[in-house]
Amino acid sequence: MLNVLHMTGHLGGGVGTVVLNYLLAKSTDKSQRHSLISLDYLNDHAVEVLSQAGIPHFDRCHGNLELVKAKIQQADVVLLHWWNHPLISDLLVRNDLPECRLALWSHISGSPAPNNFTQSIFSYPDIFIFTTPLSFFDPEFVDLPEVIKAKVSAIWSTAGVERLEGFSPKDHEGFNIGYVGNLDFTKINPGFLSLCRQIDIPGLRFTVVGPLNEELSKQFKDASMGDRVRFTGHISEDEKWEELCRFDVFGYPLAPHHYGTCDQTLQEAMAVGIVPVVLNNPMESYIVKHGEVGLVAQSATDYAACLRVLYDDPILRGRLSQQARTYAFSEYSLDRMAANWDEVYFRLMHQPKRVKTWPSVERAAHLEPHQVFLESLGRHAGVFREYLRTERLSRAVVESQLRSLGTRPNWRSENKSTVHQYAQFFPQDNVLHTWSDLMKGAQKGCR
């Protein structure tokens, strides 16, 4: 029996749903045994699902390196669900992992920093898997030596749309444009309010599903649009799909250069038959075939125009709805993804186990957490490295650059691999906290 160990920083959100559904699907496979180890927490839902399915799982393991290494040694294959999570970076950079066959599945697209690739992370595993073919165009991959490129491939990530077989659009009053997902401005477009205000549709209502963002809800209230939008807050999966069924259109304007790859929410909306309208960011343009399964807007003005077209032409909306549903069930099958991973395991089992050592630093065990953060950024660490060697630039200049960087949405989050998240996990590192304070000061000034 093949013994596969899954490793992750934590388990929650879209990635968590993918991993859980995959583990559940494989729990009935008598030829494989899967287990999960999380360096940080497993949320309550994950613990319940894994326990009921009898899948061995361990969480908050960052402080128990002995257990982590023991589980790695016992596994035939280790599958690391990777993004620039501080605890994952700390484990890989500062420790040698025992002999293993390691596949790394990237749950980020590689752009922008701090959700970026580095040459070291490509070099580290035996096999590197993208969740979207778009990552093949990332400059960090393009610049790799051919010998490293040869071990990189892609498997579309999905939580499986089969579970949505019984869901379809339902009758309701008015015209409802819905959004489902993360409301952090690293994901949702920072100009979401402005985009909504431009839409000219009689009786228009907005439904926004996702963990509350107080800044966003305040924007709508201040703009006297609070009576036209409903923020649901966090709701269950079943409640989310019921909300989806009452959308006329899936309005999904994401931030430029967001961190997403093969968006689970887009897959689910199309599977239910809700036509998506998106902006022309790379990921959305790749998934939403314009005029076939949805509409891709080229600008803010075009976004409003696309929504109006779907309001004015219910026949077009119905055709795109059916085509989106057919496409989703064809492309986003859990069985298909599982079969692709079986092929990866087969390839790995023909390779010997090897000790895994971080390739670009010496005496890694002695690195401070802020140096691990620098390693995670690679070529994107410039301003942070300059802070540590101010003989080239004055400290005042570097601090000003950090404040400026802190105004960018992808650096503002308390999570999503930012210096703020690293500072939370490593409170003893004064350098991380100094960087975080400088960048947060910029945030307060720009609001």
Image: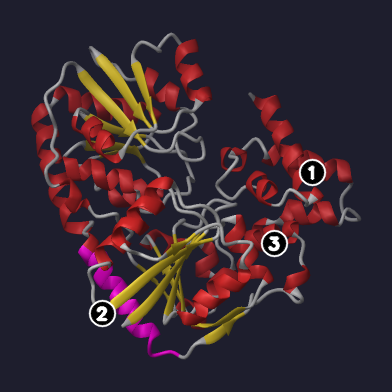
Q: Which mark is residue 434?
A: 1
Q: Is residue 287 left or right of residue 431?
A: left
x 14%, y 40%: residue: 167
Q: CA distance from mark 2 to mark 3?
A: 38 Å
Location of residue 352 in the rendering, given as x and y in whole percent from the top left corner: 47, 91
Q: Which residues are magenta?
A: 335-351
Q: Residues within 10 Å of mark 2 (few under 14, many from 20)?
A: few
Answer with the quarter of the image where residue 18 lies. bottom left
Q: Is residue 33 left or right of residue 36?
A: left
x 24%, y 22%: residue: 176
Q: Nearer the viewer, mark 2 or mark 1?
A: 2
Q: Residues within 10 Å of mark 1 (few under 14, many from 20)?
A: some
In the displayed orientation, state which residue is furthest to the top. 224
Q: Which mark is residue 31?
A: 2
x 77%, y 57%: residue: 385
- The reply to whether the C-beta atoms of the residues labelled 2 and 3 are less than 8 Å apart is no
Q: Residues within 10 Å of mark 3 (few under 14, many from 20)?
A: many
Answer above or below: position of 306 versus 435: above
Instruction: Tell which of 185 and 141 is nearer to you.
Output: 185
Location of residue 43 in the rendering, given as x and y in whole percent from the top left corner: 45, 48
Q: CA distance from mark 3 to mark 1?
A: 16 Å
- The reply to whether the C-beta atoms of the residues labelled 2 and 1 are less than 8 Å apart is no
Magenta stretch, overall SS: helix
Q: CA distance from mark 2 to mark 1?
A: 51 Å
Where does label 3 land, which residue?
Answer: 372
